[in-house]
Amino acid sequence: MAALSAQQRSAVDYRLERVSPVDGRVVSLETAYDKEQCLGFTAQAAAAFPRWSGLQAAERAGFLVAAAQELEKRRDDFLAAMADEIGAPVEWALQNLNFAGEILRETATYAQEVEQVEPLPQRQGLNSRAVRMPCGVCLCISPWNAPLVLGARAIAMPLLCGNTVLLKGSEFAPRTFRLFGEVLEAAGLPKGVARVILTRAEDSEEVVEALIASPVVRRVNFTGSTRVGRRVAELSAKHLKRSLLELGGQSAMLVLGDADIDLAAAAALEGAYTNQGQVCMSTERLIVADDLADALIARIEEGRRKLKFGDPRNLATQVGPVISIDAAERLSGLISDAMSKGAELVGGARARDAFLEPTLLDRVEPDMRVYREEVFGPILAVTRVANDLEAITVANDSEYGLACSVFSANEERAENVAQQLHSGICHINRCTIDDTPHAPFGGVKSSGYGRFGGRWAIHEFTELRWLTSARRSEA
């Protein structure tokens, strides 16, 4: 075989190859961009900004609705890509597709609020008001676990507010993100307004550093791990740019002594094992009153054994593989560590390649890694407590603070407990996994800061300005 030329080698080097966690086959081969190319795209986004920001918000909203329509036209392409690239069961992939469309459509309904002018108390001879203005180019960085939902959420409000966007997709789901970029193009967005970029893993840090440093990038939003989020925050602060960070979670579900066991068991199963536990809001810690623990664990284990575990391309499958063999090995290590320190394996834990059986651990204590670390996999860890105060203390004994839930037959009791939990989101008698385009979504502590969703996101992606004008004296 003839040797490759330098240009050919470069072309090969800048292809993203994705190996499926399902069976180890190469399922995607996509174009990756280097730093200079990405900076070029940033310049194009800056050039497109004046015209895009000059449109009425209602006109920009129309493009979001069109994108939602185009997304749904590519349904089968997205379902296949998500199954191949991230091992997403059909139900999870469908939820992603449908909710991404909902995000785009519902964000469009805020067009009037984006342009709202707030009158301020008048001084003699002076009109005074507060207005919001678009910022410029927004860098949006999205992960692989819910690529359509998190990709749509990352760009929807920035675009509605009049910004142009670069969406950096995950190298774990390159075909899925490339398809999303095609959807935006098919929706008719003007050239340069929205572009999806992909980079090789080894280039990502250099590219992100360069983009954040670019003088035309004015906002950054990042969804992903707390480790990477800290680096994004550092870089953003260095260049005095605001960032919205939605980071790791370790959601706790508190089951008080008077809770409905059937309701709690169903919520625990959904919260712990949806998408193999690879959701930022996944229920990772089950904090349960001693009196209910045995009965609740038995009910959860009964449901866990019935879960269909296997190939996500099978319509009956509810739990597929985790994102990689490395991830499965890390999760197995968490289980082994817990059991070596006294935790009881109720069920699950069998592992093969990237597949880890949904796992239920009882009597998890603070000296175990699974108690402290974000799991991001199909492991539910049970900690038993004596009373409500201990439940609150254990729930708050985490560096994370994204979502949680409280189960009790007494709404006042549940509300009292909920008010004392350190989290950005809390549900009563409901699963920890939930979202709506109209709610302020985000966390506290190491789960990040800032809020996606509803009118609160308008604040994140606009500049607030004070405008005054002198009133002419009447003759």
Image: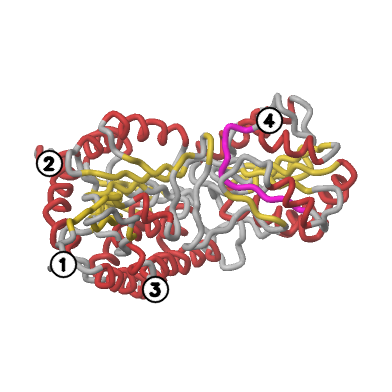
Q: Position of residue 310 (x, y in %)?
A: 60, 56
Towards the viewer: 465 or 79: 465
Sequence-wise, the earlier of marks 1 and 4 is 4
Residue positioned 33% across, 68% down in the render: 111
How many residues crowd around disc 3 within 10 Å: few (fewer than 14), some, or many (20 or more)? some
Asked which secondary structure carries label 4, the reply is: helix
Disc 2 element: loop
The quarter of the displayed image where residue 81 is located: bottom left
Residue located beneath label 4 in the image: 336
Query: Do tag 2 and tag 3 residues touch (Cβ < 8 Å)?
Result: no
- Tag on residue 474? 1
- In front here: 325 or 374? 374
Judged by depth in the image, the label closer to the viewer, 2 or 4, is 4
Residue 463 appears in the picture as rendered: yes
Task: Determine contact: label 1, label 2, CB under 8 Å.
Answer: no
Residue identified by numbered label 2 = 2
Look at label 2 and name its amino acid: Ala
Q: Secondary structure at mark 1?
A: loop
- The residue segment tinted magenta is 398-407
